[in-house]
Amino acid sequence: MTGGSILIVCAANVCRSPLAELELRRRLGEGSSLSVRSAGVRANDGDPICADVASRHADEDWRARAQAHRAREVTPEMLAAADLVLTASRDLRGELVRAAPEHRDRMFTLREAAHLGVGFAPGGSDVIADYVAHLDRARTRAVPLSGSPGRGGGLRRLLGRRSVEDPASIADRHGSRGHAGTLSEVEQAVDAIGGQLGRQRRHSS
């Protein structure tokens, strides 16, 4: 069986996307058949990870992986190689769709995937291809992700929020309180995605 590759993208690749990458790897476990990487649309290659992300967990494995992270700019080759592209926001997804429209069917925001992936049951030989197909089918029947008061309720319930400016996006907030909220939102979305993918078969040891 093949697992597939996931590329997670934010703006600078120092906060939202590396946190999502590390948390998803942690959630899936060392034996996972899935490859998870991250990049940024405006990354300065070589920048270190955000200090708040580096200290998110106290164990040595987390700290070592966080300290080893270096930002990198997303490339057309990365987009072509990824079986699933997850972005921090709808705006970033739009930038990637414009850059590589041929891959738009496999691009979702983190929150879209968390919402649309409900009910996914891994079982085929290609986990990510099956997951992407599930997400794409769900687009046509799911509650629209909208910031209007009467819509997006399913996503709000899933993420435990009463209202958000754009339920499909995780904003890059600054200031200690806003930044903490951003990190928590990334973790909530990744926890949902990890749960959806978590029953996939693993490599034999």
Image (cartoon, rainbow, N blue to C red):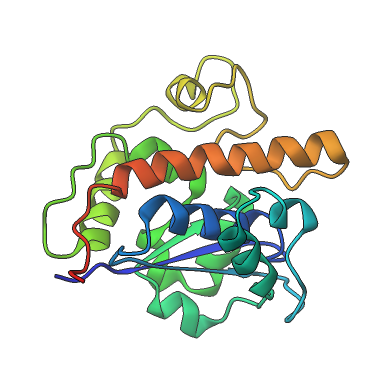
Residue 65 locus on image (x, y percent): 60, 67
Q: Relative to the observer, which residue lies in front, 92 or 180?
A: 180
Residue 94 appears in view: no
Residue 168 locus on image (x, y percent): 54, 39
Toward the front, the furthest residue is: 60
Quadrant of residue 85 in the image?
A: bottom left
Q: Is residue 113 left or right of residue 94?
A: left
Kindly identify the residue that appears in the image at 46 percent across and 75 percent down: 79
Residue 72 locus on image (x, y percent): 66, 78
Kindly identify the residue that appears in the image at 59 percent across and 44 percent down: 186
Residue 176 appears in view: yes
Q: Relative to the observer, which residue lies in front, 48 or 100?
A: 48
Quick one: quadrant of the N terminus?
bottom left
Kindly identify the residue that appears in the image at 63 percent across and 48 percent down: 57
Q: Relative to the observer, which residue lies in front, 66 or 180?
A: 66
Residue 99 locus on image (x, y percent): 55, 73
